[in-house]
Image (tube, rainbow, N blue to C red):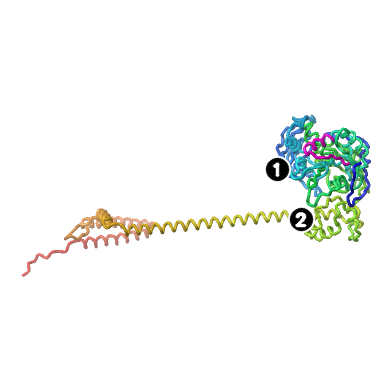
Amino acid sequence: MRKLWDFSGGIHPPEHKHQSTTRPIQPAGLPDILILPLQQHIGSPAETQVAAGDRVLKGDCLAGAIGTMGVPVHAPTSGTIESVSKHPVPHPSGMVDWCITLKPDGEDCWGERLPLINYTRHERTAVLGRIRDAGVVGLGGAGFPTNIKLRPPRRDKVDTLILNGAECEPYITADDMLMREHAADVVSGLNIMAWLLQPERCVIGVEDNKPEAIAALQAAAKDTLIDVVVIPTKYPSGGEKQLIQILTGLEVPHNGIPADIGVMCQNVGTAVAVCRAVVHGEPLISRITSVTGEAVSNPGNYAVRLGTPVRYLLDQAGVDAQRLERLVLGGPMMGYTLQSTDIPIVKTTNCIIAAARGELPEPPPEQPCIRCGACAEACPMALLPQQLFWYSKAQEFEKAEHQNLFDCIECGACSYVCPSSIPLVQYYRFAKGEIRTQRAEHLKADRARVRFEARQARLEREQAEKEARRQERARAAAESQLQKKQAAQSAPSDDRAARAVAVQQALARKSEQVKAKFPAATVDGSETPDLQVLEQQRDQAREKLATMKTMLADARTADADNVDKLERAVTKNIERVKRAEDAVKAAQPPATDTTEQP
């Protein structure tokens, strides 16, 4: 018998599992509409590859993966794309997100499927790529991309591969029924993952309250090296870190992952999805979901297509609207209340509880903490919930982090045992959200600071380069002037004489041009104005003055608007005529006296 260990804390709430295990898994059928969110996992949302009006087949890729943490979304059936729009999605806040709306055509016609029956003949990267392309994520709750988890860091050699079949939370029986009816697929999926990781041991951990599932798994793993281990029933033994500690005695380090200690944990539902993706070539388009609670007449587990509205699934289970008081998505410990039945089933939806009056009553009002320490005794992570509560409530987030706030798995055991009805988990979630927001803001500010400093450095560098170029140009100009001066000083005298002759010739040419423009008469060797030209200019001025006077008289007679303008023009012409007459008089030679002198 394999040795088992135990973890600190834990509780034993009422199980309520018998309600949904009395009959086999039922097909949920095909609803009138399917709503497929683009983000159904941890990581980047998928990118839409279809548009309204497109015809798709079952299994076709509707949205492709983005980045290393992305996985695609596929069509659960054949039909027509109605829209790509925002729609309410499963979230405690009731948020909306981008979704693809598919209207089934009722034919349920498959598209192309490419199985890898002999997967061991292929490269491991090809098998991992097939798992990624099938959209397989962890079906135990968080929805972490399976292909990433199956590719641990090279420094971390996986020695033990654990398949989680504990399913410790009350009401939920999806994994229990899956192990009972599809044990062969569970073992097949585990073998594929073991081939990828090459571990030394493969273990399936199942709580002792599931005898039928244990028997089915033992029969399916009879001729293999897989060890089916039965563990005591205690909540939350199905938590990844708790199950690892029970089966191996090892603890996952703070801020670490199981691969750091050579262990990997996968869910049994994930193993079946891996088997279907590799062996059958089928993407993840459906899952087993428990529908239970006293408000439904046919509780059980249903094979549900992803995107099925919750209201349709409740109708299949025979919900009594008169008795329904509270609708919970997930289990009573870690789930949350739904405000609408329009939200769709996604890859991580494992249970819907339709609780009747008094079945899951609202907790009483919060009372002051009495410091009883019951929360610390129940905590499976050996934390101090009381201190975390005080720091979270006072918004002293740094102190809460020092108390290992992010080690909390939000199992709800502390809230369950609190006699003061303090919603401790809600306080922890609030503190985690605020810390993540602050970190994002700090990261954004740091990036902005880095960009600003880089810009300043670039501007300073450009300014320095510009100043260096200016100084280089100034130095080159000074050197050029100095060289010219030195060349002029050292030039021979005949060169200077030649340059002087060239200057005199240029001056002579300029003088000839002036003479051609202003002709003049030469008397006794001195230049005098041309009298004939001056008289011609005088006569032209007199004629223009006479014309202007005539125009002025006509304007005055007609009382025109331009009289003032003409008067100014006449005045200017009178002055021009006077200057011309003075020039003529000045140009005339002086009169010669011919009288003989005695």
Specify whether 226 is left or right of 486: right
**What is the C-alpha distance between the residues marked 2 and 1?**
25 Å
* Residue reaching furthest to the bottom: 598
Quick check: is 233 in the magenta stretch?
no
Residue 400, x across and y down, in percent: 80, 58
Which region is colored magenta?
Answer: 187-205
Name the residue that disc number 2 marks.
Answer: 435
Rendering coords of residue 543 (x, y %):
27, 55
Q: Secondary structure at mark 1?
A: loop
Q: Residue at x 27, y 60 (%)?
A: 577
Label located before the other in sequence (2 or 1): 1
Instruction: Specify the quadrant that holds the C terminus.
Output: bottom left
Q: Can residue 510 be seen in this snapshot?
A: no
**Residue linked to disc 1:** 67
In the foreground, 595 or 309: 309
Rendered location of residue 294, percent (x, y): 93, 43
- Amino acid type shown at disc 1: Gly
